[in-house]
Amino acid sequence: MFPLRKEREVYGEWHGQLNYFRRGSPPEKIVVRIYKKKIWQFSYWLNPKLVVGNILYDSDELEFKGGFYQQDHLVLDYRATERTVKQFGSVLLHLDASGRHLNGHFIGFYNELIAGKIDLSKNKTHRSSLT
């Protein structure tokens, strides 16, 4: 095991664009706030490379779990925190060398099969209270 590099810190506020693969669907501007779950999670102490938390997107809240593969690829599985909502999926994102840009693809289910591309940027000077 090795300590996480600061550049791999994905928690905080990200701004960007969501593009669904459906024909004629316009891109959506999004703000994603990723915050850590409580520090006393047993799974974190067993595997400090594990990335867990919640994503706030619009009025939806998603919980996720995943980790980095080869330093720059983040793989996350997500699902709705509200158990009555049928929303789940997976995301594969590439973190650039600056640690400020995530881009990749998602596939999931939310009333229908959804898939698309996601591009996010993080302002390093902005310190979110969520981190």
Image: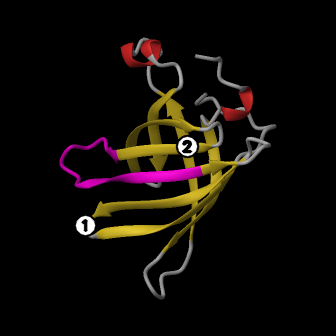
Q: Residue at x 39, y 45 (%)?
A: 77
Q: Residue at x 30, y 62 (%)?
A: 109
Q: Is residue 21 above or below residue 72?
A: below
Q: Residues within 10 Å of mark 1 (few under 14, many from 20)?
A: few
Residue 106 rendering spot, x and y as whole percentages: 46, 60
Quarter of the picture containing the C terminus is: top right
- Dominant SS type (magenta): strand
* 96 horizontally vs 82: left or right: right
Residue 123 rendering spot, x and y as whole percentages: 76, 44
Label 1 sits on a secondary structure element that is: loop
Q: Dot 2 corresponds to which residue?
A: 74
Q: Is residue 81 magenta?
A: yes
Q: Which sits earlier in the primary sequence, circle 1 or circle 2?
A: 2
Which sits in the foreground, 81 or 104?
104
Instruction: Tell me the number on the disc at residue 111.
Output: 1
Residue 83 rendering spot, x and y as whole percentages: 21, 43
The stretch in magenta equals 79-93
Q: Is residue 66 magenta?
A: no
Report the colour scheme: secondary structure
In 3D space, how far apart are the residues under numbered discs 1 and 2 (Cα atoms)?
25 Å
Quarter of the picture containing the N terminus is: top right
Q: Residues within 10 Å of mark 2 (few under 14, many from 20)?
A: many
Q: Residue at x 63, y 50 (%)?
A: 94
Q: Are marks 1 and 2 in contact (CB under 8 Å)?
A: no
Name the amino acid, label 1.
Asn
Q: Is residue 60 above or below residue 71?
A: below
Q: Is residue 19 above or below residue 40?
A: below
Q: Residue at x 29, y 62 (%)?
A: 110
- Of tags 1 and 2, which is closer to the observer? 2
Which sits in the foreground, 85 or 107?
107
* 104 horizontally vs 86: left or right: right
Name the amino acid, label 2.
Leu
